[in-house]
Image (cartoon, grey):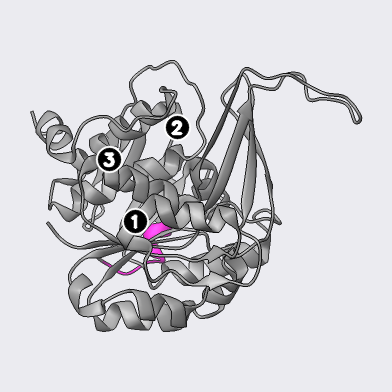
Amino acid sequence: MRPLAAIGNVNVDLILGPAEPWPKAGTELIVEHDELRVGGCAGNSALAWDSLGVDYAIAANVGNDQFGAWLKEAFGERSRDWPVEAVGTTLSVGITHPDGERTFFTTRGHLPLFSFDEVRAMLDGERLSGGHALLSGSFLTDALTLAYDELFDWADAHEIAVALDTGWPLEGWTEANQLKTVAWLRRCHCALFNEVETTTLTGWSDPAEAARSLKDAMPADAIVVVKRGPHGALALDRDGQEFSVAAPRVTVVDTIGAGDVFNAGFLAALAADMPLEACLKTGVAIASEAISTLPRSYGKPLSAFLEETTQ
């Protein structure tokens, strides 16, 4: 098993819903369920790795309040060296809707202060050599994002393959955000984007064509993954061969973090040197389990998923 690491956004998620219709100002709406849980792309992926029984390292930061202490407690020894910033912890309130979509209200909090110096102090590059690092939260971790060139240089020096999931930009996919993202992808060995992000970045309406356009902008051996929600996922391998996996039909509870959970399953299978189609199947299976359970479950250990996907 190759080493795994997550670098990026860990914050608090408060999930409420479903909400329908959207309330008018000054009114109150009673919803069916609520859940306070660890969130952020890096946090969601790491929790899934925990459930799968996968070893990993994680570089993140927290604020100096009760939420920060709670986040560190959730990750135990792995969070020992997380820096505590002199601000409140980032809080994201996710409002779910009956159709499975969601709306977020997020505070800036601690995430903009996360820096490359902090990442380098937390992660052992030699131990991670030959592995995969999930880089996430690009539009929330301001200080780290400004130092992405240094981070990519560090990863290259230690032969760590970076998998990028930027998340959705706060200002939307402006031309400037598209240009920045494509520049980052030129240094990455795996793109983990959803269908809307992929087609928006490339201008192609067909997800497979969009994936090929992204791959053309990346290193020759890069893998491009397009997460398609209820339609499963597709990917192009290092040689450009296309693979596609359908998603099972499930009763959706909430889709918040579904893509992050997919990332965890996909990268865990990739780190186990499984064929690309098996990696897709693992990611889809774990994400489908997560979005259809309350409290959230990630299913079986990784070994069980890998056994099923290769049958």
> Which residue type carries mark 2?
Gly
Residue drawn at (36%, 28%) of the image: 288
Q: Quadrant of residue 143?
A: bottom right
Percent coordinates x, y for residue 218 in the rendering? 37, 66
Residue drawn at (36%, 46%) of the image: 47
The residue under label 3 is 51
User: Which numbered disc, 2 or 3, marks the residue closer to the eye?
Assistant: 3
Is 1 rendered above or below residue 233? below
- On residue 76, which mark appears? 1
Q: Quick one: quadrant of the N terminus?
A: bottom left
Lateral position of residue 89 relative to residue 155, left or right: right
Percent coordinates x, y for residue 99 in the rendering? 60, 20
Q: How far apart are the two marked residues, 1 and 3, measured between alpha carbons?
A: 14 Å
Magenta part of the protein: which range?
A: 214-220
- On residue 229, which mark appears? 2
Residue drawn at (78%, 25%) of the image: 22
**CA neighbours of label 1 inside 10 A, class few (<14), some (14 to 19), many (20+):** few
User: Which numbered disc, 1 or 2, marks the residue closer to the eye?
Assistant: 1
Say whether marks 1 and 3 touch (CB < 8 Å).
no
Q: How far apart are the two marked residues, 2 and 3, measured between alpha carbons?
A: 21 Å
Residue placed most toward the observer, 66 or 294? 66
Percent coordinates x, y for residue 225 in the rendering? 35, 48
Q: Secondary structure at mark 2?
A: helix
User: Which numbered disc, 1 or 3, marks the residue closer to the eye?
Assistant: 1
